[in-house]
Image: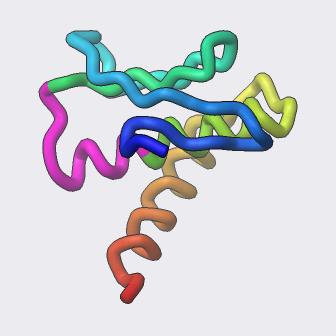
Amino acid sequence: MKKNEFKLAGISWKIVDSDMPDLGCALPDTSTILLNNKLKGQERDVTLLHEVVHAILFTMGEREHDERFVEGFAQLLYQYETQKV
């Protein structure tokens, strides 16, 4: 699988850099995550995880997402990911 793709429940999601004004967004109808192409380093990594959390929630059938929960989850997931050996 390419670095800009991942699967959830057998569905391939694409990660696409975009010149969008927002930091990122998850589009469940096309299984696409858009990321602002100006993001770099930790800011890009955390934004990607934030959108992956949205993708997971969409995959679970959840359409209403609490942004505070999603951001907190993404921040903690980033901390976990940066400590793995």
Residue at x 21%, y 11% (from the top left corner): 19
Residue 10 pos. (x, y %)? 76, 39
Residue at x 61%, y 12% (from the top left corner): 30
Position of 65 compared to 34: left or right?
Answer: right
Above or below, 5 against 14 in this view is: below
Tell whether position 44 is magenta: yes
Above or below, 58 against 34 in this view is: below
Residue 45 pos. (x, y %)? 31, 50
Position of 84 compared to 58: left or right?
Answer: left
Position of 42 compared to 11: left or right?
Answer: left
Q: Nearer the viewer, residue 4 or 65?
A: 4
Above or below, 31 against 83 in this view is: above
Residue 34 pos. (x, y %)? 40, 21
Q: Quadrant of the C terminus?
A: bottom left
The quarter of the displayed image where residue 4 is located = top left
The magenta region covers 38-48
Name the residue at the right extreme. Answer: 61
Residue 73 pos. (x, y %)? 56, 57
The quarter of the displayed image where residue 64 is located = top right
Position of 36 compared to 30: left or right?
Answer: left
Residue at x 42%, y 30% (from the top left corner): 15
